[in-house]
Image (spheres, rainbow, N blue to C red):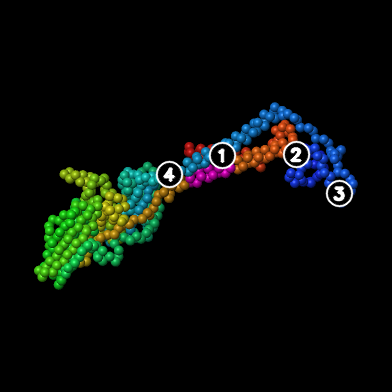
Amino acid sequence: MRIDSWVAARRDPRERAMGSVKRPPGDEPPDDEPPASEPPTSDAPASEPPPSEPPASEAPLPPLPLKPTPVARTAERARNRRRTALIVLAPIVAVATMMLGLRVGAGNVVHAASVFAAPPGKPASPDAPVPFAWQVLTYLEDRGTRETLGVSDLTVIARSKGHESRWSGASNADGVAEPSLALPGLAPNDPVEIEVRAAGDAEPLARGFVDWQSPAWAREPTDDGARAAVRPSKREGAIALDVLVEGERLVVGEATPLWAHVGAPGGDASRVTLTLTPEAGLRLDEDTAKIGCDGWAEIAAVADGHVAGIQIDAKDPDGRHGTWFGALPVAPGAFFVGAPRFVRAGTKETAVLVAPNPRTVVYAEVDDERGRVFAAALPLAVEPGDPVPRARFAMPALAPGLHWIVVSGEPRGAERLAGAAIAKPFLVGDAPGVRPDEACSIGPWLAKRPATGFPRWLALDGMATRGAANRASHRLGLFIGLLALFAAAVLEVLLLTAAAREARAIMLLADLDEPAAARERVTAKPPGGGLAIALLVAVLGFALLAVLMLTKG
């Protein structure tokens, strides 16, 4: 029996006789007070008294049992226990499902690779393929954290316009590999597909077409060499002096050429005498310098520390003077690069890279004015008779023109040439106005051409493809967890609504002075009925089962 109809049937006959008349709250007559008579209406005579007894045609309702039967009491208690268990367990199961779903969505460890590209260099000859050296970084990613990883058997394949170039090697403990590739007719913005594979892995660590960029490379187009001059603290006198450092910065403990240019009045610099006074932290082989061709004097300087300075005094027979004083730039912790200033076109050369302190690896590359030609990550070793670790950098045949050997202890130190990264210029083949066999000609020419940096950019990231499975797992786990939370929330609302309805009905029966047996028989169904409860419980159960299977699988 529905609660509303049963309560209406149990109301006092006098109240049922009043029909739909409602009293305001607090105006109900007491049980021992007879109800007030209604005023006469147009449909009934005023003298007709209101009925005080129910019509004789209505059959009396059967009385409810005063005591519940044992079977009814047991069923009621079981129903209440089930409802309480659902109310308590639904949020617990939902939270557990959400936690497992988030763990499923966290994904597994992914091995991938990234490719850092640079502009291609110039081919060694007109019919040679275009060289380019793109750095590859191998790593693993676990729960959003990346860690570099060395791969012993690595293959890098480049394809463009029907041609293919392949490199095989390994990435070191920093996860860095320096593949040197070459493709015929390659130019910036040409479509290039890169594939990075590791032995034993069915899927490539990275694969796709690279994104091209056009960074400012090596030197500014308008650089006329004036920037290379060291800024003096004092420069005075009739004889103008300027100082340049070959390679732009001194290397601690190694001899670095300084070039002093003498601007003598009348243009005859050979009559000028130079006197050198080093500051603390700088050693010189001699305290004078001989002026050579074109007014340039070479000074062999060795920096003993990170702060060095020098004073140069010039004097000619006519009594004219000139003074230059200033601090010299030093590259702290930089490698010494032992390489010639001049390399003949079409020949190979080997540079010796000497570490300033104990290290295990050095990153070296050859760059020209157009792009990155060749690179290598070399292990450092101690040679017999010399405790200083060093490496030998074998360079391929290069195109004629200006080049730099860039050396750093960091994989990407060449991008900004800051700290310990250093770039040593050298000339391949001939250049206008340069006499390679004269140091006073090629030395200042190189000193006027320091590099500003050789930037690279992220051209391809393997996580875009390798992490697809993890991203799908994340979406699936999050969906299952949110579905479980939604089902639990709706289930809680329905169960609590049913409990509130039942409590409200019991309170109403208590207000009507119904016996306890009648109140215990009251049952309120939730919105949607038992089918909605069953469906929501099933959704919770299947969501939990799904995340358990995903966790195990």
Q: Residues within 10 Å of mark 1 (few under 14, many from 20)?
A: some
Find residue 192 and report its horizontal and vertical position in percent: 37, 56
User: How much space separates mark 2 and mark 4, taking CA atoms?
Assistant: 61 Å
Q: Secondary structure at mark 1?
A: helix
Q: Which residue is mark 3?
A: 40
Q: Secondary structure at mark 2?
A: helix
Question: Which residue: 29% across, 62% down?
Answer: 219
Q: Kindly identify the amino acid type of the residue bearing the numbered disc 4.
A: Arg
Q: Residues within 10 Å of mark 4 (few under 14, many from 20)?
A: few
Q: Secondary structure at mark 4?
A: loop
- The residue segment tinted magenta is 472-489
Q: Which residue is mark 2?
A: 7
Question: Which residue: 40% across, 55% down?
Answer: 209
Mark closer to the chain start, 3 or 2: 2
Q: Residues within 10 Å of mark 2 (few under 14, many from 20)?
A: some
Q: Which residue is mark 4?
A: 143
Q: Which residue is mark 1?
A: 91
Residue 110 is left or right of residue 333, and the answer is right
Residue 19 is left or right of residue 274, and the answer is right
Q: Kindly identify the amino acid type of the residue bearing the numbered disc 2.
A: Val
Q: Nearer the viewer, mark 4 or mark 1?
A: 1
Magenta region, main secondary structure = helix
Q: Kindly identify the amino acid type of the residue bearing the numbered disc 3.
A: Pro
User: How much space separates mark 2 and mark 1, taking CA atoms?
Assistant: 35 Å
Mark closer to the chain start, 2 or 1: 2
User: Residue 484 lies in magenta, yes or no?
Assistant: yes
> Does residue 166 appear in the picture of this structure?
no
Image quarter of residue 266:
bottom left
User: How much space separates mark 3 and mark 2, taking CA atoms?
Assistant: 29 Å
